[in-house]
Amino acid sequence: MELIIIGSGTGVPSLLRASPAILVKIENTHLLMDTGPGTLRQLLKANIHFSKIDIILYTHLHPDHVADLVHFLFAAKNEPQFRRNRPVSILGPKGFLDFYEKLKMAYGEWVVVSEEKAILSEVPPYEKIIKNNILINTFPTFHTENSQGYRIEAGGRVLAYSGDAEETDTLVSLARGADIFICEASFPQKVSGHLTPAIAGRIAKEAGCRCLILTHLYPECDRANPVAKCRTQYDGPLIIAQDLLRIKL
Ligand SMILES: [Zn+2]
Ligand SMILES: [Zn+2]
């Protein structure tokens, strides 16, 4: 399993951090979680053409996490290099298909691709599905009504991604014993529906994670020494996400 942080930022434009996107490479499968604005171009910096993506998982439908879905579909429709043996599985939480219907109302045929290219569907919370020998487990994250995080298991490794989240016991279950827990740490002080570096640390400790990566940092969080804040709660391996950071696990 290899992890590449494609975008470690938020919806705020930043030269330091691109909007949220996490790539996981498992054998020949490229799995992408969230596609904030600029993700397809950011993938190229990691030497990954968007036609290589096999699975996309959406945590929720805020524009900073989903904006490049339109770009993905439009590019898949028009790029002659986009050839697939199997369609891309694009999965989102409850409400995702309704969201797509609304995109079609706005963009019409521009965002409609054939079923040989991509299939969009919903995956409910507390669900376990298997795709390409990868076990994908969903957990609600209470950031929006239907937001969910993903726990990915393959080859004896576990990677957990919070997406945007509220502090709950469910998040501890999502991250339980993970080899890597990629957790949002939006703000230095608690804001409803988001976490702080200290809370992310507390969850990682409670969950017994082997490594914690803080991501989705707003500029004010970067300025507020997130490592020191996280260290008040957690003393295990800790990484502040950077765009294009690669980790093998
Ligand atoms: Zn966000
Ligand atoms: Zn959000």
Image (cartoon, helix red, strand yellow):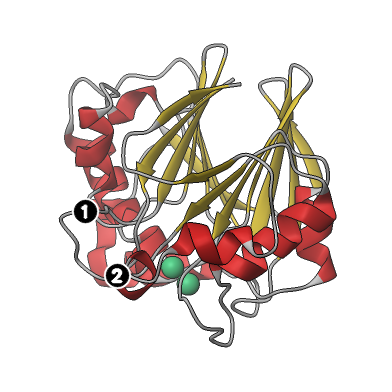
Left or right? Give the position of 247 relative to 94: left
Name the quadrant containing residue 124. Answer: bottom right
Q: Secondary structure at mark 1?
A: loop
Q: Amino acid at mark 1?
A: Leu
**Which mark, residue 219?**
2
Res. 94 visible in picture: no
Pointer 1 local density, CA inside 10 Å: few below 14, some 14–19, many at least 20: few
Q: Residue at x 59, y 78 (%)?
A: 144
Q: Give how far across and how far down residue 99 sits, in percent.
A: 47, 69
Q: Residue at x 23, y 46 (%)?
A: 74
Q: Residue at x 66, y 21 (%)?
A: 132
Left or right? Give the position of 173 relative to 219: right
Q: Give how far across and how far down residue 33 sits, in percent.
A: 50, 45
For residue 37, above or below residue 77: below
Q: Which residue, given by chain and number where applicable, does mark 1 sit on?
A: 16
Left or right? Give the position of 165 relative to 90: right
Q: Give how far across and how far down residue 77 sits, in percent.
A: 25, 38
Q: Quadrant of ligand 1?
A: bottom left
**Mark 1 and mark 2 residues within 8 Å of each other at the beta carbon:** yes
Q: Amino acid at mark 2?
A: Pro
